Image (spheres, rainbow, N blue to C red):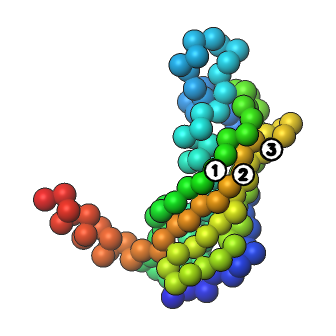
Amino acid sequence: MPTIPEGVKREEKLVVTEAVAISFLGADGARVLSTPNMILGLEHTCRSLVLPLLDPGYDTVGTHVNVSHLAATPVGMTVTFRSEVTSVEDRRVNFKVEAFDEKEKIAEGTHQRFIVNVARFTERIREKAK
């Protein structure tokens, strides 16, 4: 198993565009970062944090998300996603996650990812799909 140190952190940024904004409210002025895309940004930041620390042929998959979406972020603003490894339990990696726009904190919570051997994972999925 790889060594993933507790306390290691990563930060990534995303400019909110129409592609990641909600559209169902019907008003152009109400276009904001969608919750699913916010969670995607948090998950991506966690995966990007640990991926370089893994052995070749390994990756991670998300297994648990517990995030509060605290505030809306309008199109055009930049969101900063932050992740920090809080613990590693065998192949489970636990993270503290937060997101901020240019004005305030917009999300906080936890995320868990599971380390997988990509070849074995792929084979199990192929068998399941039959």
Picture quadrant where residue 95 is located: bottom right
- Confirm or deny contact between disc 2 and disc 1 (CB under 8 A): yes
User: What is the distance, in whole Å, between disc 3 and disc 1 at their CAs?
Assistant: 12 Å
User: What is the distance, in whole Å, between disc 2 and disc 1 at their CAs?
Assistant: 6 Å
* Quadrant of the image containing the C terminus: bottom left
Towards the viewer: 44 or 67: 67
Q: Which mark, residue 32?
A: none
Residue displayed at 72% across by 27% down: 74
Q: Is residue 33 above or below residue 39?
A: above
Find disc 2 in the rendering and name its residue.
108
Spot occupied by residue 98 in the image (x, y as percentages of width and height): 73, 53
Instruction: Please report whichever mark, 2 or 1, sits nearer to the chain's N-terminal start.
Output: 1
- Confirm or deny contact between disc 2 and disc 3 (CB under 8 A): yes
Q: Amino acid at mark 1?
A: Val
Find disc 1 in the rendering and name its residue.
67
Find disc 3 in the rendering and name its residue.
105
| Residue 130 at least partly seen | yes
Q: Amino acid at mark 2?
A: Glu
Q: Is residue 128 above or below residue 17?
A: below
User: What is the distance, in whole Å, between disc 2 and disc 3 at their CAs?
Assistant: 8 Å
Residue displayed at 66% across by 27% down: 32
Residue displayed at 64% across by 60% down: 110
